[in-house]
Amino acid sequence: MTTYHLFILLVALIWGYAFGSIPFGLLLTRLAGTKDLRSIGSGNIGATNVLRTGRKDLAALTLLLDMLKGTLVVVLAGYVFGRDAAMAAALGAFIGHLFPVWLQFKGGKGVAVYLGVLLGLFWPAALAFAVIWLGTAFVSRYSSLAALIASATIPVFLWWSGFLQLALLFAVLSAMLWYMHRANIERLRDGTESRIGSRG
C-alpha cells in the first residue's frame, strides 16, 4: 500500500466522519421547538428517541437523513477514489455518528447510519438488514433487539456472499453498535427495555 493510497483512505475517513457527525435528530427537534432530545427517554439523538417526542414526522425524517448521510459519503468516496475509500468513508461516518465532536463525542447508536453505509456499499445486504430489523421489531416491539439481531447477521451474510473485506468491516461496525447498545442489552435482560412507541 503506497503513501498516496494511505493518504486517500485518511481523507475518506475524515470526510466520512464530518458527514457522519451531523446530529440531524437534535437539529430537527430544536428547529421544531420540542424538548431537548438528550433530556428525554434514552437521551439518544437517534430516530427512536425522536419518536418519544410524539413527532412521528420528525422521527421518520431523522431516520432518513441519518441513513442518507452514510449512503452519500460512501457513494461519493467510491465514485471519486474507489472501493477502499468508500469503505474508509463508511467507517468514518459510523464513528462520526457515534462520537460527534460537536456534542462532546456523545452521539447516537448508529443503526440508521449502519444501514445507510451498507446501502451504499452492497444494497442486497441493506435489504436483508431492513427485513430482519422489521421482522424482529414487529414481533418483539423492541427497536434495540431488532438492531442487535440484524447487525449480528450482516457480517455473516456478507461473508456468505463472498465479500470478505466488507464482512470484516461490518463485523467491526456491528461490534461497535453492540457496545453502544450495552445499556439496552442490560434492560432487555432485566425486562425493563422501552418498546417502540413508548415515551418512557
Image (cartoon, helix red, strand yellow):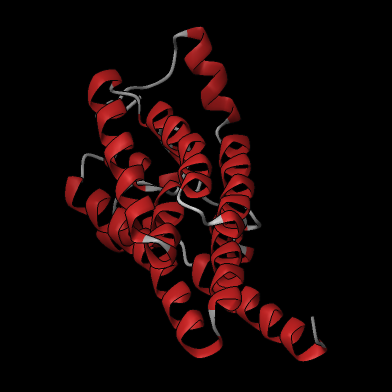
Q: Position of residue 97 (x, y in %)?
A: 53, 58
The front one of 75 and 60 is 75
Identify the residue shown where x is 25% and y is 58%. 61
Asked if residue 166 shows in the view, the reply is: yes
Identify the residue shown where x is 61% and y is 59%. 165
Identify the residue shown where x is 60% and y is 45%. 171
- Above or below: residue 182 compared with residue 82: above
- Above or below: residue 19 compared with residue 157: below
Q: Position of residue 104 (x, y in %)?
A: 65, 57
- Left or right: where 147 falls relative to 172: left
- Above or below: residue 32 compared with residue 87: above
Q: Quadrant of residue 128?
A: top left
The front one of 109 and 56 is 109
- How many marks can you see? 0
For the N terminus, the quadrant is bottom right
Q: Position of residue 148 (x, y in %)?
A: 47, 32
The front one of 64 and 44 is 64
- Left or right: where 176 falls relative to 115: right
Asked if residue 196 shows in the view, the reply is: no
- Left or right: where 87 falls relative to 72: right
For the C terminus, the quadrant is top left
Q: Position of residue 119 (x, y in %)?
A: 37, 61
- Above or below: residue 116 compared with residue 145: below
The front one of 196 and 123 is 123
Residue farthest to the top, as pictured: 190
